[in-house]
Amino acid sequence: MATPHPPQSAVTVGIDFGTLSGRAVVVRVSDGAELASAVHAYSHGVVDRTLPATGATLPPDWALQMPGDWIEVLKVAVPEAVAAAGVDARDVIGIATDFTASTVLPTLTDGTPLCELPELIDRPHAYPKLWKHHAAQGQADRINQVAQERGESWLARYGGRISSEWEFAKALQLLEEDPEVYARTQRWVEAADWIVWRLSGTYVRDACVVGYKGIYQDGKHPDREYLAALNPEFAGFVDDKLDHPIAQLGERAGGLTAEAAAWTGLPEGIAVAVGNLDAHATVPAAQALDPGQMVAIMGTSTCHVMVSDQLGEVPGMCGVVDGGVVTGLWGYEAGQSGVGDIFGWFVDTSVPPEYHRRAAERGVDVHDLLTELAAAQEVGEHGLVALDWHSGNRSVLVDHELSGVVVGQTLATRPEDTYRALLEATAFGTRTIIEAFEASGVPVRELVVAGGLLKNRFLMQVYADVCDMPLSTIVSEQGPALGAAIHAAVAAGAYPDVRAASAAMGGLDRAAYTPDPERARAYDALYGEYRRLHDHFGRGENDVLHRLRAIRREAVKGK
């Protein structure tokens, strides 16, 4: 089949729904040129302290969002991006989205979020649970324990552990903590699919999110018998609230509705692509669709995604899904729950005023100042090693009850020392993931980086040195949104498949960073210490981090 040649004027719109904001980008279909973009910050951001409707305090480890914030992105960012691009809206042939995951919400059969029902606005469980909602760890532990006891075959496809961030743990928490809201839930919907539902009027579950976050393998979810073993009232969860048609990435979900056309200013009826996840959408934008290319999408957290022609069971991975990234190959996912979030936390809470003044005097960001000071050091000069678990561990331990650790501080330790140790810790976490894949027969030949942290050149060099492999970088600064626009082009029929669209619209700067042999050997020693701490605190040798979490919960209850 010959590849279609889209008209030079044809464009698509990709929308990346992140943790704090949504970004729309207008992309020329013929060559992937990004003509303009616009960002709209969520009015409510991450709801993790108090419920907006009532001011009620939320428990520890909760993280919610407001569906109305996502709709505002369609109303504000899309028209702004189209206007800034200077294109005729009639030249937009398709629209597609990507989303954080697992961000999941309870709805009625027509898609109405339960949190928008007047009688439920004061019920936290009626709201969407953001990916970083980690309060369902107890339910996740039970999901894993029962699956292990029963020998469920699907468990190995998720690295041996289901995360508290995913659909089933959050749904089980809903049932057990607010059974009334659970009973009112008619659909348990990923935000990635909910936004497509609002755009197209069609509810279809995308193969990516259902495979990675919805425990769907070999054409089925866990059976009723297993679900009943978790909780008798949970037996019908899949049949009653989850089961729905599944579509493949790049397919057309439907046409843009009149309501959504009014929101966005785009033509009614244009193609709306099936939903996708932010990290997975980035892979074709980085032209990383060959086996062995691991894409690290680095932002507040990092998601590691790669395709392979090999099916392997990698301990601690987030999942392996047939067609989970591109049709015809196995798609793998792993990740780190905190990366940029950790650096931001440190600057916000642990850097003295003197550093802020120095940065302001020079007209630079505090992160830039700390990076410059850290980069002047030799490997190991700070005498520290840290564990990057400030937001728990997604891979390879899959335990969000873990917390951050810094070892080696003295009265001579300066902020730049700790900052560098935290940067290095996240690189060590990525190396741990790569080694787990390699040991499981899934080779990693190239590390490709996308995301907001790409701009920190020192951090990129640290990753190349720590992992001791070439580090390539995506050309686009809007990887997920560009990836969404690529899928929109496929859904609109401009290209026959995602691989062809990626070749025309994506871009990759190969081996932008190469490892320094001397630094790589020096990092081997530090990494050895990281792995000793990793196993000591993370594999049951010392359970102090879990005990501290329990103590904190009891203290908060007493307030």
Image: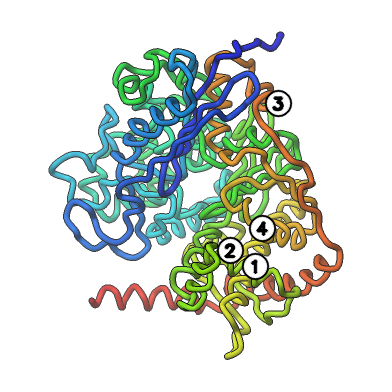
Q: Residue furthest right?
A: 517
* Mark 4 or mark 2, whichever is nearer to me: 2
The residue pinned by badge 1 equals: 372
Q: Could you say where residue 370 lies in the image, as x and y percent from the top left?
A: 59, 69
Badge 3 element? helix
Query: CA separation, marks 3 and 4?
Result: 27 Å
User: As rendered, which of 102 and 484 lies closer to the eye?
Assistant: 484
Query: CA separation, marks 1 and 3?
Result: 37 Å
Q: Amino acid at mark 3?
A: Ala
From the viewer's perspective, tell me whether residue 343 is left or right of residue 523. Answer: left
The residue pinned by badge 4 equals: 430
Query: CA separation, marks 4 and 2?
Result: 22 Å
Q: Could you say where residue 228 lies in the image, as x and y percent from the top left?
A: 38, 46
Badge 2 element? helix
* Mark 4 or mark 1, whichever is nearer to me: 1
* Mark 1 or mark 3, whichever is nearer to me: 1
Q: Given contact means CB atoms under 8 Å apart, are the residues at marks 1 and 2 in contact?
A: yes
Q: Given contact means CB atoms under 8 Å apart, are the residues at marks 4 and 1 in contact?
A: no
Q: Given contact means CB atoms under 8 Å apart, are the residues at marks 3 and 2 in contact?
A: no
From the viewer's perspective, tell me whether residue 287 is left or right of residue 386. Answer: right
Q: Residue at x 30, y 21 (%)?
A: 262
Q: Could you say where residue 549 lies in the image, as x and y percent from the top left?
A: 42, 73
The residue pinned by badge 2 equals: 368
Q: Amino acid at mark 2?
A: Asp
Q: Quadrant of the C terminus?
A: bottom left
Q: Residue at x 49, y 60 (%)?
A: 341
Badge 1 element? helix
The residue pinned by badge 3 equals: 503
